[in-house]
Amino acid sequence: MYKWNDFKKITAVTSKRTGGFSTGDFSSLNLALHVGDDKETVFKNRECFFGKKEVMMAPKNSVFVAQNHSTIVKKVTFKDAGRGFYDFNDGIKADALYTDEPGLNLAIYHADCVPVFIYVPTHNIVGIIHAGEQGSVGNITGILVRKLFLEGVKPEEVYAHIGPSASMGHRVITKERAFELAALGGDIIKAIKATEPQYFIDLPLLNTLQLRTLGVPLSNITYSNICTYENNDEYYSYARNKVTGRNISFIRLN
């Protein structure tokens, strides 16, 4: 598993695809119930991964999203524990979660999309964001951070980590899409790259720019520098395989 190890008072992890029981396109540690894999096998994978000492996820202490490439951000508490644990559609209808309750795991799924981990040590708040193309273009990271501002958080108190995701060279978009996005202006223009005849969008950069626009110091933003497309032996990649499993990323206050 991959860990964001900068802070002792949080656990922030991304699963890898190795060490599970799924076969074929989903080999082997697929943790998602909504991608067509055998459910009993997924539950075996979950039992294997969730039981690890560093993970320790259970219905009583975990909340999953029922993500849909939205820009919806929800604050959750232990009253939400168990949501999405046994049924994807029972998860919180959002693509980003945050909490100030210690011991509560917040989890998202991804296979190339950007997992953004958020930590505010001064306020004991953690958050997790599923930032795909639609969510990133819609500024889901900025939406979450603005919600933190409403709770009294200052920009310099926010720390963010960009987890394993597809790098810019593997985020191909059409020329029409590139011009459509560029017309939106702002940070998006800087995240679009043209290498004729192809156009690309740099989602890690876009999320970084959105954090910077809100005043989060560059020194507070760190990166895994892991490309899921190029490391398909360790991470699921939708861009490479289409039919594939999902890694999860989760964060909690210890």
Image (cartoon, rainbow, N blue to C red):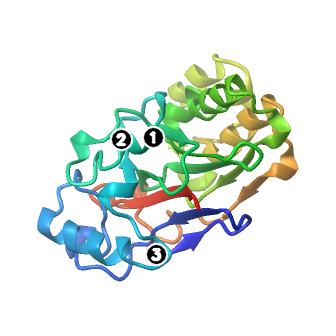
Q: Which residue is nearer to you in this view: 63 or 68?
A: 63
Q: Amino acid at mark 3?
A: Glu
Q: Is residue 5 above or below residue 34?
A: below
Q: Position of residue 231 (x, y in %)?
A: 51, 72
**How far, Cα to Cα, is label 2 from label 3?**
31 Å
Q: Amino acid at mark 1?
A: Thr
SS at circle 2: helix
Q: Secondary structure beneath disc 3? A: loop
Quadrant housing the C terminus: bottom right
Which residue is drawn at the image coordinates 65% and 65% (left, top)?
Answer: 4
Q: Amino acid at mark 2?
A: Asp
Q: Nearer the viewer, residue 176 or 15?
A: 15
Looking at the image, residue 6 sits to the left or right of residue 54; the answer is: right
Query: In the displayed structure, would residue 191 be above or below residue 139?
Result: below
User: Mark 2 or 3, which is nearer the eye?
Assistant: 2
The first of marks 3 and 1 along the sequence is 1
Q: N-terminal of the two: label 2 or label 3?
A: 2
184 relative to 79 in the view: left or right: right
Quarter-of-image position of residue 240: bottom left
CB-based contact (under 8 Å), mark 2 and mark 1: yes
Mark pair 2, 1: CA separation: 6 Å
Q: To which residue does mark 2 refer?
A: 80
Give the residue drawn at x 68%, y 54%: 161
Q: Residue at x 53, y 68 (%)?
A: 230
- Residue 168 visible? The answer is yes
Badge 1: residue crowd in 10 Å (few <14, some 14–19, many ≥20): some
Label placed on residue 54? none
Measuring from the top left, give residue 45's x and y in whole percent.
27, 73
**Residue at the farthest bottom position:** 19
Q: Residues within 10 Å of mark 2 (few under 14, many from 20)?
A: some
Give the residue pinned by disc 1. 77
The tag on residue 234 is 3
